[in-house]
Image: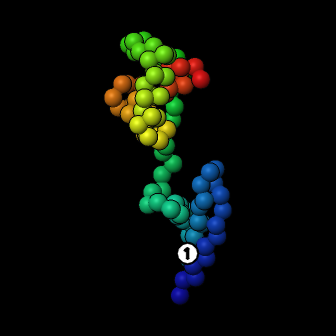
Amino acid sequence: YKRQVSTQSTWGDRVVVVQTVGGHFSLAEMGRMHSHGKGISSSSLPYKRTPPSWLKTTTREVVDQICKLAKKGLTPSLIGTQLRDSHGIAQVKNVTGR
């Protein structure tokens, strides 16, 4: 008969379960509560906060495009997706400065 004991502790930003089975320790990382993954990967913003040199769109054109899409009834997240996918504008704040 081997007795299994588990304790829960935090390790950095992760919740880790330390299991003891017959005197041997093993780390078992707990999964996310509302998704399937166990990783810590996430997207990050670009380091440079200036628009790319190849982007020739002016601030005024970007603001006009945003207003046009908002009048069509698009949500802010869909406006950002549209600008990213169709016009190559990753972050509107970097182009417009606001």
Q: Is 41 above or below relative to 11?
A: above
Residue reaching furthest to the front: 71
Residue indicated by mark 1? 21
Q: Is 68 above or below relative to 8?
A: above
Question: In the drawing, does residue 8 fall left or right of residue 87?
Answer: right
User: Which corner quadrant of the image does residue 16 belong to?
Assistant: bottom right
Q: Is residue 94 visible?
A: yes
Residue at point 35% right, 32% down? Answer: 85
Comparing 29 with 80, the one in front is 80
Q: Is 2 above or below relative to 13?
A: below
Type of residue at label 1?
Val
Q: Is residue 48 visible?
A: no
Q: Is 72 above or below relative to 22?
A: above
Q: How many marks?
A: 1
Q: Secondary structure at mark 1?
A: strand
Residue at point 51% right, 48% down? Answer: 40
Comparing 86 with 26, the one in front is 86
Residue 91 on image: x %, y % = 49, 27
Residue 75 on image: x %, y % = 47, 41
Question: In the drawing, does residue 94 fall left or right of residue 54?
Answer: right
Comparing 18 with 1, the one in front is 18
Q: Image quadrant for the C terminus?
A: top right
Residue at point 50% right, 62% down? Answer: 34
Comparing 2 with 60, the one in front is 60
Residue reaching furthest to the left: 86
Residue 92 on image: x %, y % = 50, 26
Dot 1 alpha-carbon crowd within 10 angstroms: few under 14, some 14 to 19, many 20 or more = few
Residue at point 48% right, 16% down? Answer: 60
